[in-house]
Amino acid sequence: MTQFSFTGLGGTDEVGASCYLYRFTEGRLLIDAGLRPGQLGDAALPQLELLKDSPPDAVILTHAHLDHTAALPVVLRRFPNLRVYCTSATARLAALTLADTFKIGQRQGQPLFSVRDLDRTLKALTPLDYFQRVGDHGFAFTLFPAGHLLGGASVLLESSAGTVFHTADINNVGTHVTPPAWLPTEVTPVDAVVSESTYGDTLLPARKEQVRRFVAAAGETLSEGGKVLIPSFALGRAQDIALILQSAITGKQLPSVPVYLDGLTRDVTTAYEEMLPLLPEALQNRAETSRQPPFLTGTVGLVKSKEQRESIIGSAGPAIVISSSGMLHAGVSPLYAREWLPDPSNALFIVGYQDAEAPGRRLLELENGAEVLLPDPSGDGFSPVTAYSKVQRYYLSAHADQGGLLAMIHRYDPGKVVLTHGEAAPRNALKKFLDTKKEVALPAIGEEVSLKDGGRRRGAFFSKAAFGGSAAKARASAAPEAVKQKHRKFHTEVNYDPQHHVLVLQLPEDISGSLFADGTYTVEVVRGRLTKAKLTQHQEQGTEPTVSDLPEMEQAGDELLGE
């Protein structure tokens, strides 16, 4: 019997406890096994009991973040002979994540695994290079750079029943510490794409502009003598933020103040320094030219003791602290937040995803002077803290936004799309874009879904004409000359007139005016590029043209309306 299915044991309609089971005719594969941030005991785990009747033959670990990694020792306790495949950087960083998870579980009195379980897991990690195809288990798989985190990988899965591209957490925008995700240069069809959807309802602002605003706001707080707390994911985000601040101080955009790394960010940053050859070439060149370590310079240092932390918290001068956790539900970030939030001269900057129940999300929703529940220093429960300091959000995410996800899905031209790793709103938003052309599944936890489309597919998501598709060419060759002109692609300029608050579109002289009727048009901008113009209100009687009746346009510059 042919098998070709997907089951999410966690991480389907949530960002947390990512754990995905693939059933192929040749065998079963488990991708990731993470915990739910902020949850304790068994409530933090995926539904691993579903593996009882479908034991995996192998495991792939896509990257080292807690929500993808931290339940691995529990899986290996049940299936001790499993081999866990990952990149070498992921193996190094996963050891830090798992050790920290064990330490926090011990402190909270609810450890999920033992030292023996941890040791077994670390020994099971089997490093692979990107683009190295493995076929030892009947089915085959290949890891590709995912752009989300150092060592992070997407996975191409091949079986006799079909092919699947599993995105894992993916980012199509490069950062200081991670190049963008690798994608094939040509459309490469697969049977299914299983995609994350974290920001599936969002077009994120341009990273460059967010960095500029972030630095400017930090400078304003520091120049007035305040302190800046940046709760951050320890893996990847903290190192990116450290480099942004380091560059701003060197370039005199920020005053020369101490920048401290605390919590798990300390060990991770040290590990990043030791893995310099795996970091982007620009960062390697800078370290070689300056003959200084890439992160821990005279500007950026580590908080090495509890006494030093208390000294920084109580100090009078301006300072910046980057500390874990990024959602303020654990780690040392709440220790700083408890002392600094009540002071209006300070600032707290949110720079990453916030779970719906996370204290960081609550802070963003509060009015100034309201109370937020933060973990007690004793680790026993939560208690309120009044927040008078400035709380602002900056989108420095390591996840692709809606435009990036749609472009990636198009590149693999699947018949079936399975959306995971997202709350209801982003998953449903992506589904609305996709399911007119693709068969889209939004599985619940534990629901097995086929990876074959059911014949409902109605063509490619994007117009083949824009990519020179053979079907489009055949239609064009058989069409009258007037119809051909309607599908002509041309470059144009779009300028904003601030006096009249309008966009002015400059048409080439040889474009027929008959293509554009009088009326009101809407334009769609995706990641800074004009991608669609549509007549939405006709000034005369008649039939309103559709989008396909209008020429395709490419915006010449990326500045239009931002990103």
Image (tube, grey):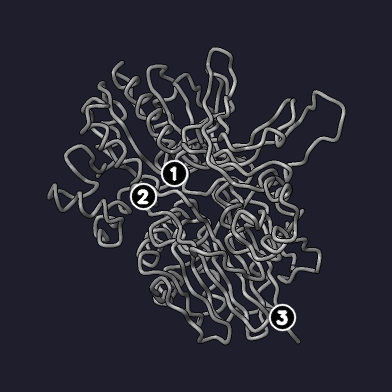
Q: Which mark is residue 325?
A: 1
* Residue closer to the observer: 476 or 57: 476
Image location (x, y in percent) of residue 462: 66, 54
Q: Residue furthest top?
A: 499
Q: Which residue in the structure is indicated by mark 3?
A: 3
Q: Is residue 257 left or right of residue 444?
A: left
Q: Is residue 14 left or right of residue 148?
A: right
Q: Which comes sooner in the sequence, label 1 or label 3? A: 3
Does label 2 or label 3 sit earlier along the sequence? 3
Residue in the picture at 25% in, 62% down = 277
Residue drawn at 38 percent across, 50 percent down: 236
Q: CA distance from mark 2 to mark 3?
A: 42 Å
Q: Is label 1 in contact with label 3 (beta carbons under 8 Å)?
A: no
Mark 1 residue crowding within 10 angstroms, few (<14) / some (14–19) / many (20+) = many
- The residue under label 2 is 264
Q: Position of residue 540 (x, y in %)?
A: 83, 25
Other-residue count near label 3 (Cα within 10 Å), few / some / many at <14 / 14–19 / ≥20: some
Q: Classify mark 3: helix, strand or loop.
A: loop
Residue type at numbered disc 1: Ser
Q: Nearer the viewer, mark 2 or mark 3?
A: 3
Q: Determine whether label 1 and label 2 are within 8 Å by CB.
A: yes
Task: Assess disc 2: are there few (<14), some (14-19) or many (≥20) residues with their C-alpha within 10 Å of its C-alpha.
Answer: many
Question: Secondary structure beneath disc 1?
Answer: loop
Which amino acid type is shown beneath numbered disc 3?
Gln
Q: Quadrant of the N terminus?
A: bottom right
